[in-house]
Image: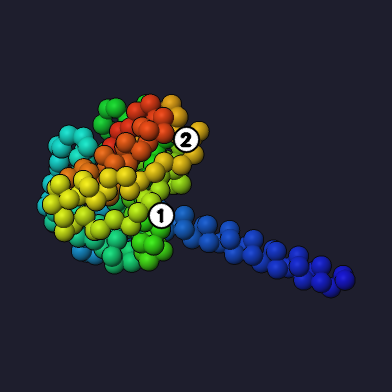
Amino acid sequence: MYASSVLYLIVRIVSLVAAVVGLVLRGIADLVGPQGCAACDAALERRSVFCSRCASMVERATTPAPKRAPFVFGGPLRDALHRLKYGSRPDLARPLGELLRAHVASEPGFERIDLVVAVPLHPKRLVDRGFNQAALLARSAARELGARFDTGLLVRTTATLAQARLSAEERRTNVDGAFTARRADRIRGRRVLLVDDVVTTGATMEACRRALLDAGAAEVVTLALAAA
Ligand SMILES: [Zn+2]
């Protein structure tokens, strides 16, 4: 009896120490920053997202809602997002999230946001990939704004076709009614920032925006990291 409780105590202490060490290591990794450029892995001289060569090729965007995004989807930014999504590099969400974070911090209109949500993946795709890149970016924005971040409020109810191969009209019908808002009590009256990684025609953003407004959101502002 006594031996088993001592053993239990030891196991608890060891797991606690392991958790603390893990947190400290993650903190150090965050301080040190990424090992290289988010697009090409070149060594970084200072804490930044891209190397100077890639940074010079990242293009600023000035697209209106629902295609609002700080950058053009192309060049090194497209490479970085591609690596994040398909290259098993969820670590790139941190530097890319910094870009979104800097945008909401410097641009007017985001200070009134009190809830941040991301365009959801279909559950099957989420299982395949292991993470929702839009949610990882959205979390950075929420942290900057001091707003609540909630991943479970929007759900993709139908497995839509990949938007990339469809025309603008097909994209609209493809995502029409594909999203449902859950927990209207957490949405009602909120000023919501809806985040995606890339916006193309804006059809997905618009379908999500409508679902949030139907659930009673006072306002829905859309923002992607890049506009195609
Ligand atoms: Zn680079």
Q: Is residue 102 left or right of residue 26?
A: left
- Where does residue 122 sit, x and y in percent of width and height? 36, 56
Q: Residues within 10 Å of mark 2 (few under 14, many from 20)?
A: some
Q: Quadrant of residue 35?
A: bottom left
Residue ID at (26%, 63%): 83
Q: Is residue 180 left or right of residue 199?
A: right
* Figure disc tally: 2
Q: Quadrant of residue 91?
A: bottom left
Amino acid under disc 2 = Ala
Q: Which one is in front, 162 or 145?
A: 162
> Which residue matches tag 1?
30
The mark that comes first in sequence, 2 or 1, is 1
Numbered disc in front, either 2 or 1:
2
Q: Is residue 185 above or below residue 48?
A: above
Residue ID at (35%, 46%): 179
Q: Which one is in front, 28 or 200?
A: 200
Residue ID at (15%, 37%): 63
Q: Secondary structure at mark 1?
A: helix
> Which residue matches tag 2?
184
Q: Residues within 10 Å of mark 1 (few under 14, many from 20)?
A: few
Q: Secondary structure at mark 2?
A: helix
Calculate the distance from the C-alpha at mark 2 to the C-alpha at mark 1: 35 Å
Q: Which one is in front, 149 or 108?
A: 149
